[in-house]
Amino acid sequence: MQDIRLITGACGRIGSTLARHWDTKAHLLLLDADPLALQRLDEELGGDHTLIPFDLWLSPPQHYQRLADMIREDYGRLDSLIHLAAYCGNLRPLFNTEAEDWLKALQVNLTAPLWLSQYLLPLLQQSAAPKLAFSVFNTLEEQAHYWHGFGIAQAALNRMIRDISEENGSYPNLAVCRIDTGWIESSLSRNIFPDGRPHWRQAEDIMPLFDRILDAPAGQLTEISHEQC
């Protein structure tokens, strides 16, 4: 029986590369806000997969519940949930952040991963070896300031990951992973630093990091870093 793996931000640079990397190795649930990009990704894949057009920014909590209900009806379980969706925008002083950009950064980078994990936890618990993985950005690796809502959401996300892993008495069979992919060549990275950086890697180079999720032990936090790849 194939694993059921859900990837958010499936049409981003890392997400689409991971979809191609895991193509034919699992049934992939590919979630992204861009239906046309999902269709283009669909044409590149040959394995079993399901396209899920879903806006993490605009969807209310009841839509997350509806998504969980759909997955329950169609598959009965979820083996892996991989959080890759991210939103940053241009760097700017915190006090120059527009209200919508602030709220979107908190929603996409922090609240949406929490809601999705909450609503899908019962399905993860139906798996023999469920995996919950969060991709994080080490913003200080590039520079210390001007990360506005994105930087604050990243700090809170790291705390949330720690709390989830330390509260594992409620879900002892769940493996929690934090993945620091390092900076890669992508539209998100270029939106932040338009000129790029010479040390950025290609998404294909970091795919072994995601394979390590599959071997992560239950009941603890597994740290996966680009320095290991």
Image (cartoon, grey):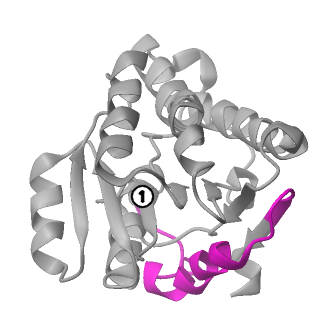
On the image, the x and y values in percent for residue 97 come to 50, 20
220 in the magenta segment: yes
Q: Is residue 7 visible?
A: yes
- Badge count: 1
Q: Secondary structure at mark 1?
A: strand
For image coordinates 15% across by 79% down, the residue present is: 44
* Residue ID at (43%, 68%): 14
Residue 49 location, quadrant: bottom left
Residue 229 vertical placement versus 65 (above, below):
below
Q: Position of residue 69 (x, y in %)?
A: 36, 33
Q: What's the residue type where badge 1 is placed?
A: Ile
Q: Nearer the viewer, residue 197 or 114?
A: 114
Residue 60 visible in the snapshot: no
Q: Which residue is mark 1?
A: 7
* 40, above or below 53, in the image: below
Q: Residues within 10 Å of mark 1 (few under 14, many from 20)?
A: many
> In the figure, is residue 55 to the left or right of 134?
left
In reply to whether residue 58 is colored magenta, the answer given is no
Q: Is residue 3 left or right of residue 199?
A: left
Quarter containing the C terminus: bottom right
| The one of 93 and 119 positioned closer to us in this rendering | 119
Q: Which residues are magenta?
A: 194-222
**Quadrant of the image occupied by residue 203:** bottom left
Q: Vertical placement of 155 versus 115: above or below?
A: below
Residue at figure coordinates x 52%, y 31% from the top left: 119
Name the one closer to the observer, 222 or 93: 222
> For the N terminus, which image quadrant?
bottom left
